[in-house]
Image (cartoon, grey):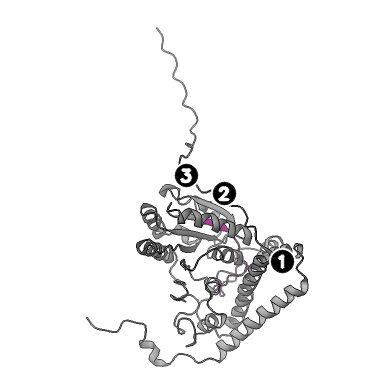
């Protein structure tokens, strides 16, 4: 009897996941007062960064200086949901995150200009600021290093059982670093309380993410470690806050780490020394016109009946704070030479 012809294999389809996943975040329903606070915080970061760019151009800030202009909604939305027990760590584009941790603008600006009154006594500069008091653990210049350190912060939170969650930011460029995946593996094995935030501003240093990453949907990067990921509009502060609420609920329930890919965009170059010739002015302007996070909230406030005069008063107050911080940073003394020997290891063993 002749055998029946072999059946062609069915097309390969990915199996349906039976893993629990967080719910899809919803935009945060902010009150008028909360919207005003978000507006004020984003505006403070932008005006602060614009002033830092001016001081860099005048030679008052040395080394590298990476500005956060355009990305304000990410940090404001996420950090507005944190409690006093939580910790924050990021890379070298760190000024805005520090301001949101409650560090006074004058202390940050004085650090940028290398002054004794700076938050790190003038030793950190733009890329290496730090404040244990404010639960801000850096500012790190090594690409991706903060991911491993942030995982250590999460381990400390779990070890101490203090209820805290670590918020570890990194960019699309750092997403290809090997230490990131070692950290993912450990964090999921130990169910550490950490939110990994990928600030995908599309270009890393100067190469677009789809040219540098084989998998450019970065929220999927944790799948092989069973870490769920969510992709969020990082130009919308309410979407960012909604994502933070969902992520914090997941982590605080003891379910381990989660990844938030925040799709955002920086208006300036990678650093102040970057002419950003890898993209057109029209591209940058199109994002400004369509998706600017501050203008978006300004429109929402207008719809809620907030008068233009009230917003102008906020703008004036922000500019006053920033100008005062710059004046302070220019006039306060530089560190004494003896500071070379403090906060470093000098003992013999």
Q: CA distance from mark 3 to mark 1?
A: 37 Å
Q: In the shown orientation, is residue 26 left or right of residue 299?
A: left
Residue 47: give its label.
none
Local secondary structure at mark 1: helix
> Residues under labels 1 and 2: Cα distance?
26 Å
Q: Residue furthest top?
A: 1
Residue 271 x/y as whole percent: 55, 72
Q: Dot 2 corresponds to which residue?
A: 24
Spot occupied by residue 255 in the image (x, y as percentages of width and height): 43, 51
Residue at image coords 70%, 63%: 296
Assess whether residue 182 is covered by the magenta stretch.
no
Give x and y (percent) for residue 19: 45, 43
Q: Which residues are magenta?
A: 260-276
> Which residue position holds label 1?
298
**Residue sitting at 65 percent across and 57 percent down?**
29
Question: Badge 2, how many Cα within 10 Å: few under 14, some, many 20+?
Answer: few
Residue 288 visible in the shown view: no
In the picture of the structure, the residue carrying the numbered disc 3 is: 20
Where residue 146 sits in the image (x, y, percent)? 43, 66
Magenta portion: prevailing SS class:
loop
Residue nearest the observer in this picture, 254 or 109: 254
Nearer to us in this view, 161 or 295: 161
């Amino acid at each position: 009897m002749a055998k029946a012809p072999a059946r062609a294999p069915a097309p390969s389809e990915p199996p349906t996941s039976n893993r629990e996943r967080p719910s899809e975040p919803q935009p945060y329903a902010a009150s008028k007062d909360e919207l005003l606070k978000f507006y004020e915080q984003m505006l403070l970061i932008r005006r602060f960064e614009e002033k830092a760019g001016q001081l860099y151009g005048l030679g008052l800030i040395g080394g590298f200086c990476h500005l956060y202009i355009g990305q304000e909604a990410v940090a404001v939305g996420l950090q507005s949901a944190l409690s006093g027990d939580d910790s924050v760590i990021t890379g070298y584009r760190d000024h805005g995150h520090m301001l949101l941790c409650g560090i006074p603008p004058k202390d940050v600006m004085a650090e940028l200009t290398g002054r004794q009154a700076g938050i790190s006594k003038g030793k950190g500069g733009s890329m290496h600021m730090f404040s244990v008091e404010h639960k801000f653990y850096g500012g790190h210049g090594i690409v991706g290093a903060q991911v491993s350190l942030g995982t250590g912060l999460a381990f400390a939170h779990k070890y101490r059982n203090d209820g805290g969650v670590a918020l570890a930011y990194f960019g699309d460029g750092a997403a290809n670093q090997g230490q990131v995946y070692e950290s993912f593996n450990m964090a999921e094995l130990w169910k550490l309380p950490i939110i990994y935030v990928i600030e995908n501003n599309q270009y890393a240093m100067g190469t677009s993410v789809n040219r540098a990453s084989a998998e450019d949907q970065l929220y999927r990067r944790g799948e092989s470690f069973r870490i769920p990921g969510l992709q969020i509009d990082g130009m919308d502060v309410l979407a960012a806050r909604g994502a933070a609420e969902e992520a914090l609920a997941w982590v605080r329930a003891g379910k381990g780490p989660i990844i938030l890919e925040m799709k955002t965009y920086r208006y300036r170059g990678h650093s102040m020394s970057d002419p950003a010739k890898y993209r057109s002015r029209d591209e940058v302007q199109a994002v400004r016109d369509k998706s600017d996070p501050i203008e978006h909230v300004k429109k929402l406030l207008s719809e809620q009946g907030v008068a233009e005069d009230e917003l102008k008063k906020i703008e004036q107050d922000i500019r006053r704070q920033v100008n005062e911080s710059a004046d302070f940073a220019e006039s306060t003394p530089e560190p004494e030479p003896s500071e070379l020997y403090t906060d470093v290891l000098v003992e013999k063993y």
